[in-house]
Image: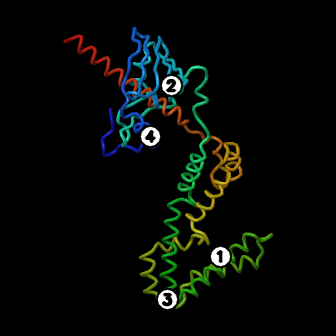
């Protein structure tokens, strides 16, 4: 059953499927042999073997070979055409019309342990996982960014009510940030540093000179109790996320280097990243699955037409 048009998800392999469709629009089925479960047919564009492939079946097996989808043998049920017609698949699931194929399930049916070869380290997946984790994190995520925007809006209004110009506002922020950085980088959190940081923060959030009526209105318009209690960072959560992601890119060349980077950044990305699978399906295997899907559909249409002819 296909999902309703309004809720169909995007195909994560849309580009690969689009390339496959573009290269196989004119492909037809050529039956070379058909004797029960022993079958051999070719899928190709008329007059060329480019982007063509053969499918051969015998009891319990299906093999692919050719210009693409070369060198794969699957085993599961006596009739593998029937198996691939429905097992681990639903038609028209994605918004681009691609079938939803359970690639993991199909890979498990590969002979000779090839299921371990059809996934490759993907640096883009590594960066995507890092980005998704950061966007959901409490301190660096999208919600934290929204709070940061609200906090800056509150401070801008507060400083406006105090009659401060842009230079004066910037000076308060710089004093606060410098004091916080000095407090954090000092060898000891001594009394002087703590007092300096507290004074800079108090100056940033000071309500001196603001009439009670205007302050009351300010607290009604903004969540003062929450926002004034949160540290104001020099760099926004979004900026800090980008810095971390860019650093991760420098360590995305190999799977081992990526996992080493994750282990060294547990404080930022969490301690369970050793479970992350940084591999994605090899494009040749994706093409093979799409080849099998098209071949099965063409063959079933061929078999249905033969049945109708026999009945007539």
Q: Residue at x 56, y 39 (%)?
A: 280
Tell me where residue 14 appears, x and y as whole percent. Answer: 44, 42
- Do the residues under discs 2 and 4 have CB atoms within 8 angstroms? no
The mark found on residue 210 in the picture is: 3
Of mark 3 and mark 2, the one earlier in the sequence is: 2
Residue with the most extreme top position: 35
The mark found on residue 64 in the picture is: none
Of mark 2 and mark 4, the one earlier in the sequence is: 4
Residue picked out by circle 2: 66
Q: CA distance from mark 3 to mark 1?
A: 24 Å
Of mark 2 and mark 1, the one earlier in the sequence is: 2
Instruction: Please rate how many residues cluster around mark 4, counting C-alpha atoms within 10 Å: few if below 14, some from 14 to 19, many from 20.
Output: few
Instruction: Please rate how many residues cluster around mark 3, counting C-alpha atoms within 10 Å: few if below 14, some from 14 to 19, many from 20.
Output: some
The mark found on residue 19 in the picture is: 4
- Do the residues under discs 2 and 1 have CB atoms within 8 angstroms? no
Q: Helix, strand, or loop for circle 2?
A: strand
Residue with the most extreme front position: 47
Q: Residue at x 45, y 74 (%)?
A: 222
Residue 293 quadrant = top left
Of mark 3 and mark 1, the one earlier in the sequence is: 1
Residue picked out by circle 1: 177
Q: Nearer the viewer, residue 10 or 96?
A: 96
Residue 202 quadrant = bottom right
Q: CA distance from mark 2 to mark 4?
A: 17 Å
Q: Residue at x 57, y 68 (%)?
A: 236
Q: Is residue 21 left or right of residue 228?
A: left
Of mark 1 and mark 4, the one earlier in the sequence is: 4
């Amino acid at each position: 059953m296909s999902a309703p048009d309004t809720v169909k998800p995007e195909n994560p392999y849309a580009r690969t499927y689009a390339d496959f469709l573009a290269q196989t629009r004119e492909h037809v089925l050529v039956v070379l042999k058909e004797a029960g479960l022993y079958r051999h047919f070719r899928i190709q564009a008329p007059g060329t073997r480019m982007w063509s492939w053969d499918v051969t079946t015998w009891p319990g097996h299906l093999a692919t070979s050719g210009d693409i989808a070369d060198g794969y043998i699957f085993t599961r049920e006596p009739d593998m055409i029937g198996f691939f017609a429905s097992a681990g698949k639903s038609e028209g699931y994605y918004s681009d019309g691609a079938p939803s194929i359970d690639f993991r399930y199909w890979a498990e049916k590969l002979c000779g342990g090839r299921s371990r070869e059809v996934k490759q380290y993907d640096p883009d997946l590594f960066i995507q996982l890092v980005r998704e984790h950061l966007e959901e994190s409490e301190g660096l995520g999208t919600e934290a960014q929204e709070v940061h925007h609200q906090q800056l809006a509150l401070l801008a209004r507060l400083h406006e009510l105090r009659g401060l110009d842009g230079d004066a506002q910037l000076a308060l922020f710089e004093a606060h940030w410098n004091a916080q950085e000095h407090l954090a980088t000092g060898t000891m959190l001594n009394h002087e540093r703590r007092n300096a940081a507290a004074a800079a923060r108090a100056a940033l959030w000071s309500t001196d000179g603001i009439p009670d009526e205007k302050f009351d209105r300010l607290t009604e318009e903004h969540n003062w109790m929450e926002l004034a209690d949160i540290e104001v960072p020099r760099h926004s959560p979004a900026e800090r996320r980008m810095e971390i992601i860019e650093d991760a890119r420098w360590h995305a060349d190999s799977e081992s280097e990526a996992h080493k980077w994750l282990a060294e950044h547990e404080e930022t990305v969490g301690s369970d990243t050793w479970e992350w699978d940084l591999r994605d399906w090899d494009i040749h295997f994706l093409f093979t699955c799409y080849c099998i899907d098209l071949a099965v559909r063409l063959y079933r249409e061929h078999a249905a037409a033969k049945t109708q002819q026999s009945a007539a």
